[in-house]
Image (cartoon, grey):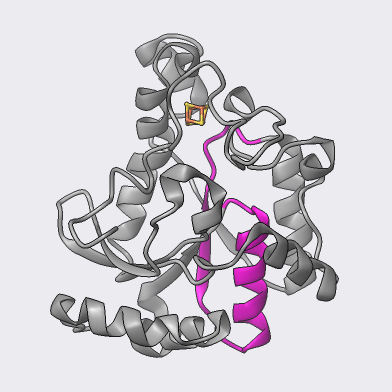
Amino acid sequence: MSNLDPARLPELDEQLTKLAPVDRLRWAFETFGDRAGIGTSFQPAGVVILHLAKSAGLPIRAFTLDTGLLFPETLAFKAQLEAKLGIQVESVLPALTVKEQAAAHGAELWKRDPEKCCEIRKVDSLGKKLFELDLWIAGMRRDQSNERSSTPLLSLAARPDNSDVWKLNPLVDWSREQVWAYLKEHDLPHNVLHDRGYRSIGCWPCTQPTSGADERGGRWPGFEKKECGLHTRTKKGLGG
Ligand code: SF4
């Protein structure tokens, strides 16, 4: 367990900003060891992060939140990527199956109350996982949407009991073009749904193909909702 003083956040953020993403990951592993974890939903940025860690010999554990409502293509891509990189990505499951959720809250909760559905299927699962970690590595980038334009590289996030967990977005300052160029350069695969117009891929009931500047514009069509709550509900004061 790392004893990093939260007061060092501004100084560490400044140091890490000067480093390449792979060296940010090296710092993460050297500082936090097996208390660091890469959370991924297999978007291109996540693929880059997993590949950088693997190529640099950094055995950082990885996990994904399997809501039970992921596209079959996403699940197939997970298996493809694990085989390609020789890694295992842990599937973290919600407390309720989709059937149990329907029995408790009604069928297709995502159509009536996506906040509640995301809370049960994503936010609560992540919250449990964060108790095993001191550093959560995520794939947020500032150019993904207006809502993400001021995302910090390093921050302090909150576990469900409001205790601190460090959070690192090693590709925060990369553009979409840089991410895709990296995949091409290293002959890395992508989720086939990207070839069908999906730009940001989540659960099948809440994701549509989209075009335009907002990469996340196809998420939760028909709702004001822009984030599932993973990054907003765990946010702490210092820019999380
Ligand atoms: S993205 Fe949609 S289906 Fe998935 S957890 Fe959130 S509301 Fe439910």
Quadrant occupied by the N terminus: bottom left
* Rendering coords of residue 111 (x, y %): 49, 13
Residue 16, placed above or below residue 212 = below
Residue at image coords 79%, 58%: 80
Is 115 situated left or right of 46 in this image?
A: left
Q: Is residue 207 magenta?
A: no
* Rendering coords of residue 18 (x, y %): 45, 86
Residue at image coords 70%, 32%: 210
The image quadrant of residue 232 is top left
Looking at this view, is 219 or 126 the one in front? 219
* Rendering coords of residue 40 (x, y %): 55, 57
Is 191 situated left or right of 143 in this image?
A: right
Residue 68, placed above or below residue 115 = below
The segment highlighted magenta reads: 41-70
Residue 141 seen in the figure: yes
Q: How many numbered marks are there?
A: 0
Is 134 situated left or right of 211 in this image?
A: left
The image quadrant of residue 216 is top right
Quadrant occupied by the C terminus: bottom left
